[in-house]
Image: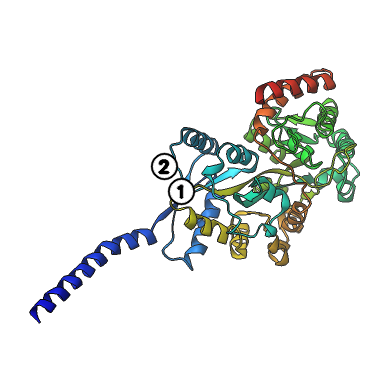
Amino acid sequence: MKKLFKVLSVVVMAFATLAATLAPMTQVSAKEKVTVWAWDPNFNIKALEIARDIYLKDNPDFDLDIVESAQNDIVQRLNTSLSSGVTEGLPDIVLIEDYRAQSFLTAFPDAFVPLDDYYNKEDFADYKVQATTANGKSYGVPFDTGVTGLYIRKDLLEEAGYTLEDVTNITWRELAEIGKKIKETTDVKLLSMDLNDLGLIRAMINASGAWYTKEDGVTPWIADNEALKEAFTVFKEMYDADIVNIHSDWAQMLQAFNGGKVATVPQGNWITPSVVAQEDQAGKWAVVPWPKQDNVEGSVNASNLGGSSFYVLNTKNSETAAKFIGTIIGGSKEFYEQAMNEIGVLGTYTPMLETDVYNQEVDYFGGQQIYKDFAQWAEQIPSVNYGSHTYAVEDILKNALQQYLSGGDLDQILKDAQTQAENQLN
């Protein structure tokens, strides 16, 4: 009997020791911290805080470490770490701009986790899904949309003899003619642009389903790109007509429209907070659809400028990270409603169109339902492959545009740019 008691005592002690050993391991596992990198404390970081708080309601053991860094710093750190094969210190989740995503997915295909099983791609706009897809797999959960609109001063438009109907669903050349009349009548220019940032050109050609590279996302498409040629041509016409204000930084751009130097702001919807910041212009602004390109078949009155998506890196916490990002960013109406109301986030999560969230009338824009309009325009944006070389090609095109504005032959300039891009990228 004593022998049996000793055996049982040993067994009990063994189980107790094992339980004591496993308990902290279980605790650590349950409290494993998921890390995310993102930029912009007032937008992306705030959105992540909202997402975390919603997820914690059903997942109290979840812990999210949100690390804010400048976008360029994130890009550099990702490139450096992934290129060297040293992944220690990388986050579990990272926010990547749509224009840059393919460069990472192509160069480091094993570094990211496919997310097809964590959210329903059918719930998002096609153009956003394409930006996050590589080799038939979805590696990112779409976040904010860069859907564009033409913000326009109604008072200046009316002073020149036009109505909002006259600038709705028009072309760039039609807008240019209206811009000339506004300049003649009010001495206010049509729009402002930084010649070292071709965002306007990008959005012009995106509306025509074109990009700087062909559908493979690799082959430079410059010399025979009719949409790009048309964008350069119409911009020069506006530039030569002296209806374009030139700025060189963000502050000058804000001053251009807040200070009454321009009558329109052709931008992504993310510019809205900057427009409404000028309180004494309340009621004077409206937003109409993006102008489409003349002489380009298939061009539409909708485009994109900017936008980003969340990606999960292949880390030990990747499954936990994927469940979080897929559940909230990929499928929570509560998240998108709260994020829009608090910080103006407009995503491409189409089930939100079935709600009343976007129906709110915005007093600053004369009661216009601008969020509903943007959401509807987002569904019309042509899908394009942004490829891996957007900014590399754009550096070449900046010089090309300057040459053209200085009087060079456009066809030859684009041919030279094509050759330079082929030599540089291949």
- Picture quadrant of residue 13: bottom left
Q: Nearer the viewer, residue 224 or 306?
A: 224
Crowding at mark 1 (Cα within 10 Å: few <14, some 14-19, many 20+): some
Relative to 15, 48 lies left or right: right
User: In the displayed structure, would residue 346 be above or below residue 183?
Assistant: below
Q: Quadrant of the N terminus?
A: bottom left
Quick check: can you spot residue 172?
Answer: yes
- Which corner quadrant holds the C terminus? top right
Q: Position of residue 233 (x, y in %)?
A: 84, 28
**Which numbered disc covers residue 89?**
2
Q: Secondary structure at mark 1?
A: loop
Q: Which residue is mark 1?
A: 315
Position of 55 compared to 235: left or right?
left
Q: Is residue 28 left or right of residue 265?
A: left
Q: How far is disc 1 from disc 2 in space, using C-alphas?
A: 10 Å
Asked if the residues shown at circle 1 and circle 2 are in contact, with their CB atoms under 8 angstroms apart, the answer is no
User: What residue type is disc 2 on?
Assistant: Gly
Q: How many marks on residues?
A: 2
Nearest to the observer: residue 122 or residue 97: 122
Q: Amino acid at mark 1?
A: Thr
